[in-house]
Image (cartoon, rainbow, N blue to C red):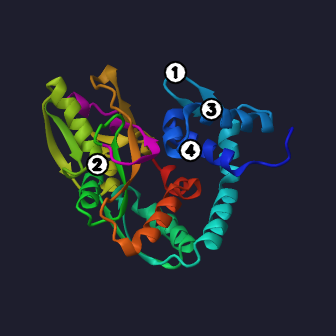
Amino acid sequence: MTDRTLDIELLRTLHMAGSLGTLRATAIRRHCTLGAVSQQIKRLEHQLDRQLLVRFKTGVQLTAEGEQLIAQSLALLAEHDALLERLSHRSTQGVVRVGLPDDYVPQVLDSLLPALRQSVPRVRLQVTTANSLALRRLVARGELDLAIALCADGDASSPGLPLWRTQPVWAGAAGNELHRLDPLPLALHPVDCAYRAIGLAALNAAGRRWETVFASTSVAAVESAVANGLAVSILNRARLTGAMQVLGSREGFSTLPECLACLIESPDVAAQDGAAVALVKSRLQASSLIERIKLVG
């Protein structure tokens, strides 16, 4: 190692690149140029004398050593950010209305919210969970100040900063032939689900007939319906279990576009709460908090 001091900002850039999967999205998030992000990663690799990212035409992927560094530096970033916020925003107060996706409710309650409250102790948080499209409407109407919502990668209407990527896939029970039925039996979330919209658009474009045989607002319930061979659904690849299989081109299904979890902000934040909203926004962008929920897919 040529430098005995790790730069916090270089670590933060690596965390974001690992979450987002592209240097371009990382540059947007870091408010700098693509070249600057590339140089930051190279500087960190030079400091540690090891390759941390593999670069492809379509994006980047963490190496095993990159994954290890992120895991080992997560607590360091969390402590650094919490200390900085306590010293810099001791007088910041206000009410902030935050929306979070239903898919992440267990992680939100067990990990994210306690950490967020600890880092902004003088800010009153009012938290709402809903499907992503519903959250986007609430933010647009000014009923929420901030929200994390899923949207299709490349969606021109995507209104916020990218936080991490997810990969929706067609999923069925392992060894099950349910996907051959006509019409295709589906387990679906309500109409405000981003995955539902992506999947049904693909089926309709292919002229494939389908019917809803199971509907639930619970992601766990939809996953159970798939695992038990009741229906096919659109799930995050990271959440598939050994009881499920990915349905691809061999089974007659097209590849679905990636999604981005984006942080969106209302244009109608109350003036007296502006500083509090800005503080919570900065914390929700922090790698240490994002890592608490993104790893479940």
Decide which of tag 2 and tag 1 comes sooner along the chain. Answer: 1
The mark found on residue 225 in the picture is 2
**Residue named by callout 3:** 38
Q: Amino acid at mark 4?
A: Met
Closer to the eye: label 2 or 1? 1
Q: Quadrant of residue 15?
A: top right
Q: Which of the labelled discs sits on residue 57, or is there none?
A: 1
Instruction: Report how many numbered discs are placed on residues in the image.
Output: 4
Q: In the image, what residue occupies the spot 54% across and 57% down?
A: 292
Q: Find residue 268 and report its horizontal and vertical position in percent.
A: 30, 64
Quadrant hosting residue 90: bottom right
Q: Amino acid at mark 3?
A: Ser
Q: CA distance from mark 2 to mark 3?
A: 43 Å
- Residue at coordinates 34% horizontally, 34% vertically from top-left? 154
Q: Do we see residue 112 in this rendering? A: yes
| Helix, strand or loop status at disc 4 | helix
Name the amino acid type tagged 1: Lys
Q: Which residue is mark 4?
A: 16
Q: CA distance from mark 2 to mark 4?
A: 34 Å
> Label 2 vs label 1: CA separation?
37 Å
Quadrant into which the N terminus falls? top right
Q: Is residue 243 above or below residue 248?
A: below
**Image point (32%, 21%), residue name:** 249
Secondary structure under tag 1 reads loop
In the rendered image, residue 42, in percent from the top left (x then y), is placed at 70, 32
* Label 3 Cα neighbours within 10 Å, binned few <14 / some 14-19 / many ≥20: some
Which stretch is magenta? Answer: 158-181
* Among numbered discs 2 and 3, the one appearing first in the sequence: 3
**Label 1 or label 3, whichever comes before in sequence order:** 3
**Residue drawn at (31%, 46%) of the image:** 228
User: Is residue 53 or residue 242 the one in the foreground?
Assistant: 53
Amino acid at pointer 2: Ala
